[in-house]
Image: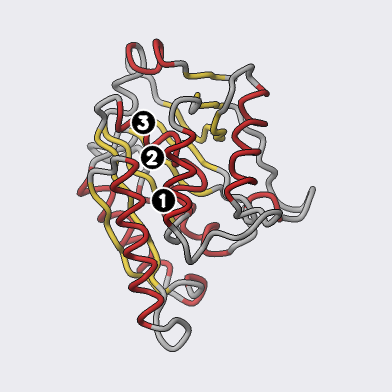
Amino acid sequence: MEQFRLNTFVSTRADVFERTLVIAPHPDDEVLGAGGTIARLARAGHDVRVAVVTTGQQPDYAASDVAMVRSEAEQAHALLGVRETSWLDLPAARIAETPRRTINASLQEIVRRTAPTALLVPFAGDIHVDHQLIFEAAMVAARPHQPAYPATILAYETLSETNWNAPYLTPGFHPNVFVDVSDTLDIKLSAAGMYRSQVRASPHERSIEALKALAVLRGATVHLPAAEAFVLIRSVIHL
């Protein structure tokens, strides 16, 4: 179990997160899964970027709703300290109907352009098929035979996606990396609240109360006031 506190997080592991790219299948996934970590990294001076893979398209989504969510994302990202937000504009809730080569090419291009040292991705076992396929495409984009590739890949959890999968039939989320977000939890919760079209009233899992409760639970696991949990997918260490 790896635990990042501020002293080690900044001094001995700074190079790991020097350039971090967060892959969000849909706008708000990045805040739900890694908002506190994003704010922590940005505060420490790291280059943090977000790639939102899908965009709602007509007739499934009204143009006004799509514009609203994009505006909410921009506000949330500004608060967190995200340096750049990229919209890949693949069709939301239709990733399974999109050619795999199209998804792979889109993720490969953003990884090539941003050259991240660390990649934060959705969890492979999430119930939403968009998350599953985007995880796989991110792994294709991050293959280590390239001249440059992210040495660290972490999968984050998304409430109402990661925990709604079928027990014993799909991969379970068993975190082994915990990021101390005690000092940035309030920023995460404020950023989540900026997604006014997405946040729900308690006891819904996408409520502010549920997000806070999860952070407190993950923190208690490693004796911290609050944490975000990840599954380590890959870590290449150059000594």
Query: How many neighbours does mark 3 have within 10 angstroms: few (below 14), some (14-19), or many (20 or more)?
Result: some
| Front-lying residue, 2 or 239 | 2
Q: Are marks 2 and 1 in contact (CB under 8 Å)?
A: yes
- Counting from the top left corner in percent of width and height, residue 160 is at 65, 55
- Residue located beneath label 3 in the image: 151
Position of 48 with respect to 190 (left or right) is: left
- Counting from the top left corner in percent of width and height, residue 121 is at 46, 46
What colour scheme governs how the chains and residues are painted in the rendered image of this protein?
secondary structure
SS class, disc 3 = loop
- Counting from the top left corner in percent of width and height, residue 70 is at 34, 65
Instruction: Using the image, tell me which numbered label, if any, was put on residue 89.
Output: none
SS class, disc 1 = helix
Q: Earlier in the sequence, mark 1 or mark 3?
A: 1
Q: Quadrant of residue 58?
A: bottom left
Q: Earlier in the sequence, mark 2 or mark 1?
A: 2
Q: Amino acid at mark 1?
A: Ala
Q: Amino acid at mark 2?
A: Leu
- Residue located beneath label 1 in the image: 138
**Cα distance between the residues tagged 2 and 1:** 9 Å
Instruction: Using the image, tell me which numbered label, if any, was put on residue 119.
Output: 2
Residue drawn at 27 percent across, 57 percent down: 86
